Amino acid sequence: MLQISVPGYEIKKPHSKCVVSLDGFPLNNNNKKGIKYFSCILDTLRNTSTNFESLKKLNLEDNLVKTISKLAADDYYDIKIKEKNDYILKTNSKNLKIKRKNEWNEFKPPLEFHELENNIFDKLMDKDLSKKKNKEALNFYYSQKVISRLDEIVNESNVENFLFDPIPLGNSCCIHQLTKDFDYLDYFSKDKNIKKLIKQSKNLDEELYNINRTQIITSHTTYNEIESFKNKVYPDEEDITQEQISKLYETFVSKPGSLHLGKKHAFKNNVCLLTGEKRNEIKSETYTNDDYFKILDLINNVKSYSVKPNFTEYNPDGLLNIYDVIESSEENVLNNDKYLIKFFKLLKETKDKVKIQELWNDFNEQVKVEIDEILNIFKSVLDAPKVKEIKNIFLKLGELNNIYEENKIENE
């Protein structure tokens, strides 16, 4: 039905993943573009909901060809297909006759040369035209005649500027002295015919556009405002595809209770380093429209932030994160560490770069001291190579060069 309509349908909202076409079989047998388009649409539909599950075991393209072949054999459709092909041939032949003219017709001058000749109108040149009914046609004719005559004179006049080859600018003619009372038409004043044409044209203008006789009409038509979509952020529910939702869940963390909610997954060998989820398991899930809006909210919430009380705007974000760790430590292990509490208190209070650097240098020394204390305990139960290996792990903690590999080694 779409193919045989005269005039043809134009698809305004194509499917994003399918090549749009209503061409080909059965209207003509050159291709199957139309069949492929509908096969593509059905292919995406059968993966979206249970309503289209019956399509899953079918070869869509072959089934469409078989079904449409039977329909096209009907006498009614057979006649309609012939009528549509005749219409296409006529339309194409008309388009071939219309040739684009690449001509410069702007009145610069010159226009494209044209001769105007209307003996009846020409005879009325010297007469009173106030009682004529065809004033608009007369005015149009005389105006065109003025332009045509000006064009003729300009092209017959000598070029006044120096000639260059190639010509960088258009050649100029018609030299004339510029005064306060200069009028472009002064140059053409010698031609009496032009003067008559201009005079008649002006008279007709006054007759046609006399303000005293002009009727002014006001309209009270009310127009409905065109619907605005400027505040429409999310797509309509019917436009959301399963693939779009699945792609969002594959890209962003949505695992309940995760510290990284709304942030991007960091996959290594198709396993997320942040949540431990497998990419295939995320992609195989079936999602609803509610899931789509839920993950969009998660992503947007990550971009918002709140500042904890008692912190000045000079505190780096990293310090806020460290305070979170200290406050949430089990059994207040970090809260009871006197050195740690004193260190962060001094760090928070100072804004001097030199003092900050001194504090961090002292902190690094303290870490080394504590590592040595731990290693002394290990020395009593492990051999020297193992102790050296543990020391190496301690010293590299926090470098974060290869987190995934380091975590595997340390867990072992």
Image (cartoon, helix red, strand yellow):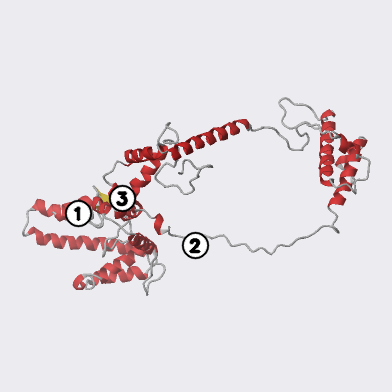
Q: Nearer the viewer, mark 1 or mark 2?
A: 2
Q: Which mark is residue 47?
A: 3
Q: Quadrant of the N terminus?
A: top left
Q: Amino acid at mark 3?
A: Asn
- Asked if the residue under mark 2 is in contact with the one under mark 1, i.e. CB atoms within 8 Å, the reply is no
| Mark 3 neighbour class, 10 Å CA radius: few under 14, some 14 to 19, many 20 or more | some
Q: Earlier in the sequence, mark 1 or mark 3?
A: 3
The x and y percentages for residue 229 are: 51, 59
Determine the image quadrant of residue 254. Answer: bottom left
Q: Residue furthest bottom?
A: 310
Determine the image quadrant of residue 65. Answer: top left
Q: Which mark is residue 231?
A: 2
Residue shown at 25%/54% (left/top)?
A: 273
Q: Nearer the viewer, mark 2 or mark 3?
A: 3
Q: Residue furthest top?
A: 165
Q: Amino acid at mark 1?
A: Asn
Q: Nearer the viewer, mark 1 or mark 3?
A: 3
The x and y percentages for residue 329 are: 22, 70
Q: Is residue 13 visible?
A: yes
The x and y percentages for residue 406 are: 20, 52
| Mark 1 neighbour class, 10 Å CA radius: few under 14, some 14 to 19, many 20 or more | few
Residue shown at 34%/48% (left/top)?
A: 44
Q: CA distance from mark 2 to mark 3?
A: 31 Å
Is 94 positioned to the left or the right of 254 in the image? right
SS type, badge 2: loop
Determine the image quadrant of residue 375. Answer: bottom left
Which residue in the structure is indicated by mark 1?
Answer: 407
Q: Earlier in the sequence, mark 2 or mark 3?
A: 3
Q: Is residue 49 visible?
A: no
The x and y percentages for residue 72 are: 41, 38
Name the residue nearer the viewer: 393 or 379: 393
SS type, badge 3: loop
